[in-house]
Amino acid sequence: MPTETFIPPAFITMLPGYPLTDPPADEKSPVEKLFAELEAHEREEEEVLKDYQDAAENAPDAGYRYLMGLVLEDEERHHRLSKAMADEVEQSVLWLRKKDALPAIKPAPDQRAALLRQTQAFLATEQAGEKQLASMREQVKGLHGGLLELIVDIMRTDTEKHIHVLKYIKKRLEEA
């Protein structure tokens, strides 16, 4: 005689394949709304990536192609990050643990100190680089129609991002 499994109503919506149609937006949980938003963003970004790639490869102007290539590199990374976030949220909605789409920082106790020292060294390097780039910006101001200034600004923005990431890592390692 088959037995029936009781599934609490709150969990039924989390089962794969349920519901056959999406519930009205106001009935979705915050996590479901976030997942839908991430999926929509990912679809939109796929289209934009194609356009950037075409511009980076086929535009009639070499300078334009070069700069579009820089933007394309960032957009490809953004797409990978967006996909990883969507995978992570999807796994939490479905209560799956297939893989760590976004792995946490959890070093073994004997590795933590070495990783922290390395992170602090990287952080010092990036902070010194930030100062060098600020000085360099003044030196290139107005050269090559402002293109060199733009490139230094891009490098400064990347350096700020690296510092932000390294501070996050440092904090997690100190908490471990």
Image (cartoon, helix red, strand yellow):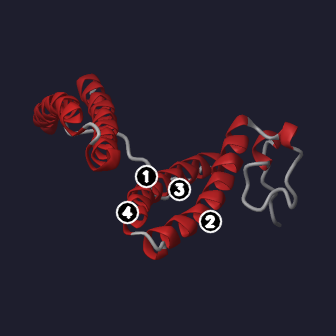
Is there a contact, CB below 8 Å, between mark 4 and mark 1?
no
- Crowd tier of the residue under label 1, counting other residues whose Cα lies within 10 Å: few below 14, some 14–19, many 20 or above: few
* Cα–Cα span, label 2 and label 4: 23 Å
Distance from the alpha carbon under mark 4 to that under mark 3: 30 Å
Residue at mark 2: 47
The residue that disc 3 covers is 83
Q: Are marks 3 and 2 in contact (CB under 8 Å)?
A: no
Q: Which residue is mark 4?
A: 63
Type of residue at label 4? Gly
User: Is 32 situated left or right of 91 in this image?
Assistant: right
**Amino acid at circle 3:** Lys
Q: Nearer the viewer, residue 51 or 82?
A: 51
Q: Choose mark 2 or mark 4, whichever is in front.
A: 4
- Mark 4: which secondary structure? helix
Give the alpha-carbon distance from disc 1 to disc 3, as whole Å. Answer: 12 Å
For the point 53% across and 51% down, the residue is 82
Look at label 2 and name its amino acid. Glu
- Per the image, the residue denoted by label 1 is 100
Q: Residues within 10 Å of mark 3 (few under 14, many from 20)?
A: some
